[in-house]
Amino acid sequence: MLRFDKLKIITSIQYVQNINKGSFISHAKDGKLLYDKYQQKSPCSVLIMVDYAKNELVIEFTSKILMEKCTELINHTNIRLCLQNINALQICQLDIDNILNNSKVVKCDVTKDVVHSDIESIRKQIYCSLSNCRKWVCEPYGDGIILRNIVSTSRYKNRIAIYDKGHEMEKATNSTFLSMLKNKDEVMQYFHGKIRFETNINTMVQVRQMLNINDNDLMSVLYAQASPFIPILDKALNAQPAQSMKSSTLIDYQRELLLRECEYDMHKVELKIRSLVSKNTSIKRIMEPYRKLWEEHLKNEATPEINIRELVT
């Protein structure tokens, strides 16, 4: 079951009533009302725009609208509750049944929380597995990373944010939201030790392509089966998980590359080095740091590499 941290939907203007003008900001041009807009960022993000020019109702919200059930993320089992909680804000009255049956998804953030305690190991694994550094980059994102394509060579932007959700929930920006929860401790405990993978799908075409569906209907999106993470990872990473480098300096990195080339066979390493240095060079001195790296490799050999695809499947 797909889960979403954010949805942006468009539906008919007929499905909203009792607009609280004191909560909305009106925008007009030449004396003609174009739209009314409501937006809040805390304790949860909600945007509602009543577009009179297009006869459309735009609704955008994040999973925090679920309040105590935010750990579930947005999905087909709780979408009605999301809209009910928006109605509870008393800024307008949404016709929930019609919105559920007659809405299009124009943007969405597909999200998966996985149990993993070490964001750094995931970062290293992805960095070492990049298929093409000219097409894909790995950038810092708080204590996590962003894997994205360089959009100048691609029609659509592909982006996956990966970060420690437990640490993110501890930030001051979430304090107001957490203070409103009856089960704050349960929510924090749930997110402890969870790594969040999140991809932003920002066009209607991308929604259909990445979720492998024929239309943008709300229910088609919520019931989609395809994982949008896998196609991105297939393009961005090598087919097999790469063995992550243990080195922390450039010279150690270069040494480890030679160890890999020689398949961690120290005899091959020594022969290679002898072929590249003068006869008067102390082979024992040169080989010493290679032996230390080789011993470190043996210690870590039993630890399986992380398969990023398996984490998000």
Image: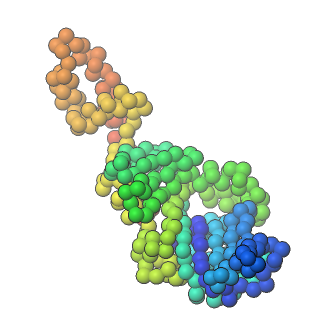
What residue is at 46 percent from the left and 82 percent from the top? 215
Quadrant of the rendered image containing residue 258: top left
Residue 68: x %, y % from top left:
70, 67
Q: Report x, y in % for residue 284.
A: 26, 16
Count of number-bearing discs = 0
Q: Position of residue 11 (x, y in %)?
A: 61, 83
Colour scheme of this structure image? rainbow
Which corner quadrant of the image does residue 124 belong to?
Answer: top left
Q: Is residue 286 left or right of residue 219?
A: left
Residue lying at 74% horizontally and 54% vertically, measured from the top left: 175
Q: Quadrant of residue 35?
A: bottom right
How far across and down, in percent of the image, does residue 211 sit?
Answer: 44, 73
Q: Which residue is more in the foreground, 152 or 265?
A: 152
Please indicate whether residue 157 sits to the left or right of residue 184 in the image.
Answer: left
**Residue under the point 35% across and 60% down:** 234
Residue at 37 percent across and 38 percent down: it is: 245
Which part of the image, by quadrant, shows the C terminus? bottom left
Say above or below: 60 vs 273. Answer: below
Q: Residue furthest right?
A: 22
Does the image show residue 274? yes
Q: Is residue 223 visible?
A: no
Q: Is 233 placed left or right of 191 in the picture?
A: left
